[in-house]
Image (cartoon, coloured by chain):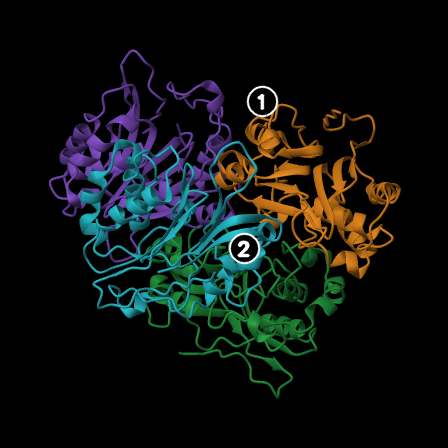
Chain colours: A orange, B green, C purple, D cyan
Amino acid sequence: MCRLLAYVGDPILLAHLVLWPDRSIIKQSYDAQERKMNPSLPSHLCHGNLNGDGFGIGWYSQEGSDTSPCVFTSVTPAWNNDNLARLSRKITSQLIFAHVRAAYPGMPVSEQNCHPFMWGRYMWMHNGVVGGFSKIKRRIVALLSDEAYNTVASFHSDSAASFALFLHHLPSMTAPQSPDVLLQAMQEEMEATSETSLLNFVVSDGNTVIATRYVSPDTEEPASLYFAE
Amino acid sequence: MCRLLAYVGDPILLAHLVLWPDRSIIKQSYDAQERKMNPSLPSHLCHGNLNGDGFGIGWYSQEGSDTSPCVFTSVTPAWNNDNLARLSRKITSQLIFAHVRAAYPGMPVSEQNCHPFMWGRYMWMHNGVVGGFSKIKRRIVALLSDEAYNTVASFHSDSAASFALFLHHLPSMTAPQSPDVLLQAMQEEMEATSETSLLNFVVSDGNTVIATRYVSPDTEEPASLYFAE
Amino acid sequence: MCRLLAYVGDPILLAHLVLWPDRSIIKQSYDAQERKMNPSLPSHLCHGNLNGDGFGIGWYSQEGSDTSPCVFTSVTPAWNNDNLARLSRKITSQLIFAHVRAAYPGMPVSEQNCHPFMWGRYMWMHNGVVGGFSKIKRRIVALLSDEAYNTVASFHSDSAASFALFLHHLPSMTAPQSPDVLLQAMQEEMEATSETSLLNFVVSDGNTVIATRYVSPDTEEPASLYFAE
Amino acid sequence: MCRLLAYVGDPILLAHLVLWPDRSIIKQSYDAQERKMNPSLPSHLCHGNLNGDGFGIGWYSQEGSDTSPCVFTSVTPAWNNDNLARLSRKITSQLIFAHVRAAYPGMPVSEQNCHPFMWGRYMWMHNGVVGGFSKIKRRIVALLSDEAYNTVASFHSDSAASFALFLHHLPSMTAPQSPDVLLQAMQEEMEATSETSLLNFVVSDGNTVIATRYVSPDTEEPASLYFAE
């Protein structure tokens, strides 16, 4: 169960979101007071308010020759990463993602497993857990088109499989899509899960941002997600 | 296309294989004169005699309460890794694996992708490439029992999938097996590939070591593999 | 302000100290309830009960051709390090150090800055802070013999400088020393500090272990250090 | 002995220098045909045309609230670093440094030891070696003002000490300086060395770039350095 942040608006220095605020994403890496405990885990496997299993930032830029975002990930904690501190002081963007990770016990910590994930013009983050993922994984992966299957480095994590499933539900993975179509793909992606799940997803194509806050069954409390305009 | 080393015999300090010889595995990390170029790659993607995309060592030990080997992997090159130099000067074993990796272009470099892979009592290394893997991957993965499917962190690499397929062909993944049975599982694993492939595999259960040197089609030259007794 | 552990006794699997106990050093990496806050730091720079800025283990072994210990360090947190989990399940020793680090703000996180430090037959760990180190550093470093000056990779940290100063106070840095002589070198090393300091040091030559628990001024409470026989 | 690159001119995507050219800095990381062998090293310690001991990029940006550059460094080789590939495709600058490192044997590989170094408005890179550095290090470090002494994380490397010495020779480390003053500080810095040395330095304050190509004694060939306008 991680913490994440998305910003869309006037171009802003990343440090204003990542480094300097009282409740910055770096603060969330070592003191996330609202981090929800994974209900399927014994408490001794939950490392309290800690999101120290790597991190990632992503942003869209006017620079470069394609529509893809730029992503920087690392396996070390956000709070002691000098590259993160330096980059965030010198990069501005109008659409920014940031994510600090608390790996599910047994899940590998690698740069490839850090969010945001990217493919083509899309960025994807997840805070939560797809319940019973190990049991439904093969069924989910079998649904994917070859094109979607080949997008992500590994299907070991529920977050990566969810992103592939979202891409699978797009009419075209490469052509631009309207906000309505993105929303529908997100809904179809979320229908694939059935058990107790916490599905706070954020996706963007560089123009639209879709963020979900979802729990199943709805007798549970979803993970917190704040929204300001 | 990597380089690898396996030793079975009297207990020996790892440094005698890893650090000190003229053709040590560390030497192979920056000057592997017999590293075979991947025939399916354009030459500008082949980094000459270099195996600098991480490494791993594995060994069986009398210590500990189970039959599993011990594995140490890292994403940095073997030649500048202080932990490797220190560990290899102070650990002895009678059955040792070492592997320096040249990642296929586009394959992620992570500790989880470094060989040797381990599961239960087994260690596995690969030098070579399963030809056309991206095209046959879904078919191979579909063959696996759930138990074998869940063994490896990622099926993105041909080496990881090959290991899972080997485990799948064992009568039992947890019970000890005779050398003949291990050999048969290896043969069945290798039959799953059809295109141009270089399959130098090494597997051990702590007692037996099986090493293959194979190329398909047999008009090609296989990757070199030396054997001394 | 870190947490550390030293063991001397019958050979024991490292996992019994590092992985498995309720208050293992891994538990200390994310939930060190007695971690003392650095009195010279504003509270918002103290990351609570967290020691996630790298770690190290060291042990003496009968293997190998010299009297040096073996040390494994990493910049990632102890709680998610697969190499640590694997090594500690398969290595036994009669003299073991372990250390989880909370870096002083601004101090670099690198493998070379992780404890235990080693030189020749010696291992060294520190939990605490040399008060006003930035002001007395040049004076301390100037005291050192060339031989001691060249031992440690960096004098940026108070812990590394303290180790060099300890080595400097030995009659010979290479010849074996009696426990009394080691103790005296430790005392002379500690006299070099004057301001508010927390000096829990542990040093060993493979036979003797010296551990200090010290605070200056003595109106303060020293960092906790437990001792069992 | 490393390879380095500096660019000043119209804003350009970093990938045009780092990723895409035939002789990009990434190519230099695994195939630096003009890498000069260190004359003071036995040949078996020279890893041929390899600069795989970490890398760094730095650039000046109009973004952010101060005059400091942005620097990204990593201990892994440039050729397999996904963050480098992604960042360089999305960042433009009018003043860019890039450096691939071949560490002197025994020198630690850490992010802090990767070039470019930065302090305040300055970036610094070095390709070469200060001859007999271990013998003159204490004398050089003793020359430094406290302000210059405290700039760099470690004085273990000749490159870091050279940068501190350059800063020491500035009339003020914080006020802007004219090109003439920068040049003079560079000259005074270089006079501190006497033995066989290869001193290809590059320094910038965001406006001026000074690059040196120097060998001592002048009967030797300096390391290659190309210049295009």
What is the spatial separation of the Cα atoms under label 1 and label 2, in whole angstroms? 32 Å
Q: Residue D76, relative to residue D24: is it above or below?
A: above
Q: Secondary structure at mark 1?
A: loop
Q: Which residue is mark 1?
A: A22
Q: Nearer the viewer, residue A136 or D147?
A: D147
Q: Secondary structure at mark 2?
A: loop
- Please state the horizontal and vertical placement of residue A151, each as a whole percent of the image: 72, 56
Determine if residue B171 is in view. Answer: no
- Please state the horizontal and vertical placement of residue A197, each as a whole percent of the image: 77, 36
Residue A23, by quadrant, is top right
* Left or right placement of residue D1 versus residue A153 in this view: left
Q: Looking at the image, which residue is at 23% across and 41% down?
A: D141
Q: Looking at the image, which residue is at 79% across and 61% down?
A: A146
Q: Nearer the viewer, residue B14 or B157?
A: B157
Q: What chain letter is assigned to the residue under label 1?
A: A
The quadrant in which the N terminus of chain C is found is: top left
Q: What chain letter is assigned to the residue under label 2?
A: D
Q: Residue A78, relative to residue B214: is it above or below?
A: above
Residue type pointed to by label 2:
Asn
The quadrant in which the C terminus of chain C is found is: top left
Q: Nearer the viewer, residue B35 or B65?
A: B35
Q: Which residue is mark 2?
A: D81
Q: Nearer the viewer, residue A40 or C139?
A: C139
* Left or right placement of residue A184 versus residue C148 in this view: right
- Please state the horizontal and vertical placement of residue B50, each as a whole percent of the image: 47, 68
Q: Residues within 10 Å of mark 1 (few under 14, many from 20)?
A: few
